[in-house]
Image: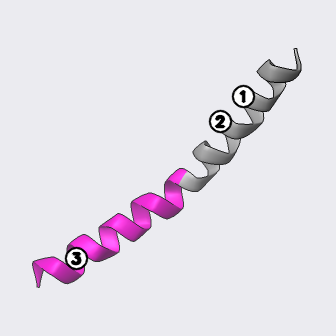
């Protein structure tokens, strides 16, 4: 059960980080496209 809980916490942190990664990639893409 502890391993499952740790996996869920890790997954949650990755999901929370997704918007930041998307915005970062989008910003780099816009800069390179100019």
- Residue at the far front: name it: 3
**Residue 34 relative to residue 14: left or right:** left
List x then y, in percent, for residue 28.
28, 75
Q: Which residue is mark 1?
A: 7
Q: Are marks 1 and 3 in contact (CB under 8 Å)?
A: no
Q: Are marks 2 and 1 in contact (CB under 8 Å)?
A: yes
For residue 13, above or below residue 26: above
Quarter of the image for residue 25 reads bottom left
Q: Quadrant of residue 29?
A: bottom left
Whole-percent x and y of residue 11? Answer: 65, 35
Say which residue appears at 68% left-offset and 47% top-offset.
Answer: 13
Is 12 left, or right, of 27 in this rendering?
Answer: right
The residue that mark 2 highlights is 11
Magenta residues span: 18-34
- Residue 2 image offset from top left, x and y in percent: 88, 21
Q: Is residue 1 above or below residue 20?
A: above
Q: Residue furthest right?
A: 2
């Amino acid at each position: 059960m502890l391993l499952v809980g740790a996996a869920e916490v890790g997954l949650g942190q990755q999901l929370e980080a997704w918007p930041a990664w998307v915005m970062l990639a989008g910003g780099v893409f816009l800069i390179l496209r100019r």
